[in-house]
Image (cartoon, helix red, strand yellow):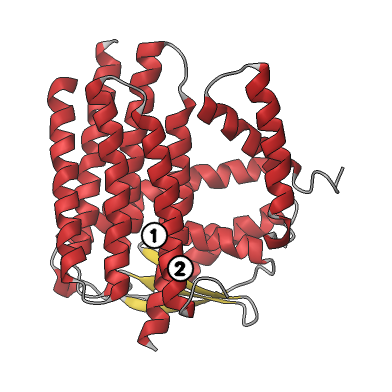
Amino acid sequence: MSFLVEALVSFLLLFGAVFAVVGSIGLVRLPDFFTRLHGPTKATTLGIGAIVVALLLHSTASAGAVSLKELAISLFLFITAPVSAHVLAKAALKARR
Amino acid sequence: MLSLALPLAVALVALAMALNLVRLVLGPQLVDRILALDTLNVNAIGLVVMLGLLLGTKAYLEAALILAMMGFVGTVALAKYLLSGDLIE
Amino acid sequence: MSRWLPQPVLTFVIAGLWLVVVSSFTLNSLVMAGLVGIAIPLLVRGFWTDRPHLRRPLRALGLLGRVLVDILIANLQVARRVLGPLSRLRPAFVTIPLDVSSPYVATILGSIVSLTPGTVSVEIEMEARTMLVHALDAPDPQALVATVKTRYEAPLKEIFGC
């Protein structure tokens, strides 16, 4: 594996991990449910998505063939995150009324 | 470089999961706990995927895929329970 | 055709996903992928609302690229707000009037809004044609409504033609 690919994989891993932590800090720190919802739906999704893409790059570079399973995981995360945020927000709104 | 970045990323995601656990215990409402569980699950996907990289095996990808699917279905089912009071009408 | 393959695109997506997950390209897995791809759309036919046709596929790709860039920018903004002083946040519920008539397109808009600019879609009311959105920091709600409408809704209307 070349130096460039390794640097990119390392960068994506750290970038993703930092965003996962930011999302979780938001979950703990923000004052009420609706503001808390923002951290996990955006920051954590992007963070874990970046980690999975880093793995996609790594396995593609080391095996020489595109590994699509990682791409499926990260797509799935990006499609489902807004949906679960939406149902949770709906449930919270109903509980508040 | 990767041998340095990978353990650091694992540690950061583990820290994120510990923070999720704080919210899971504190609550105060049921929705907060469901949100914390969902986030915990998403972080667990990242952790499992990195564990696969650390151990050099591809078998962990299936686990990550199943976590992603089951976590989504579980979150929606719990939210649906809060919305309507039961799961099957 | 339409009786046995109600969603041809969905059939291909499911079959492709099956091949990816099995990660082998033998006759066995091909047959299984075809069977799953035909069976699942038939089973979920009852839940599916009618989908408007994609009028401008190239424009859709452009929108996808814009959304991906916006996801990155929105995340940097959310990170700054989460880590910064909380007293300066002005969270607000904002009602956005919808121009799109199809629930399918409204769902796509809701997903984009949830992933991009500091907002989460809370409720979509198709009868009243409104979308309730919660913003993490909205000093000017009118500007937020204008941004969502011009940046995401107008291209979606153009792409799906409704």
Asked if A84 appears above or below B81 in the picture, the reply is: above
* Contact flag, marks 2 and 1 (Cβ < 8 Å): no
- Disc 2 with disc 1 on a shared chain: no
The N terminus of chain B, quarter of image: top left
- Determine the secondary structure under disc 1: loop
- Determine the secondary structure under disc 2: helix
Q: Nearer the viewer, mark 2 or mark 1?
A: 2
Q: Nearer the viewer, residue A33 or C102?
A: A33
Residue picked out by circle 2: A87
**Residue at the image point whose x is 68% and y is 43% from the top:** C10
Residue C70 is left or right of residue B2, and the answer is: right
**Residue at the image point whose x is 30% and y is 74% from the top:** B30
Asked if C127 appears above or below A51 in the picture, the reply is: below
User: Circle 1 marks a residue in which chain?
Assistant: C
Q: Nearer the viewer, residue B85 or C47?
A: B85
Residue C64 is left or right of residue C52, and the answer is: left
Asked if A35 appears above or below C21 in the picture, the reply is: below
Q: Nearer the viewer, residue A82 or B47?
A: B47
**Where is residue C148 drawn, in percent x and y?**
49, 64
Q: Residues within 10 Å of mark 2 (few under 14, many from 20)?
A: many
Rounded to the nearest angstrom, the CA distance separating label 2 from label 1 is 19 Å
Q: Say the numbered circle drawn on residue C117.
A: 1
The C terminus of chain B, quarter of image: bottom right
**Where is residue C27 drawn, in percent x and y?**
68, 18
Q: Amino acid at mark 2?
A: Val
**Where is residue C158 drawn, in percent x and y?**
68, 56
Q: Say the numbered circle drawn on residue C73.
A: none
**Residue at the image point whose x is 44% and y is 73% from the top:** B81
**Residue at the image point whose x is 35% and y is 57% from the top:** A41
Q: Quadrant of residue A3?
A: top left
Q: Amino acid at mark 1?
A: Pro
Q: Is residue C27 visible?
A: yes
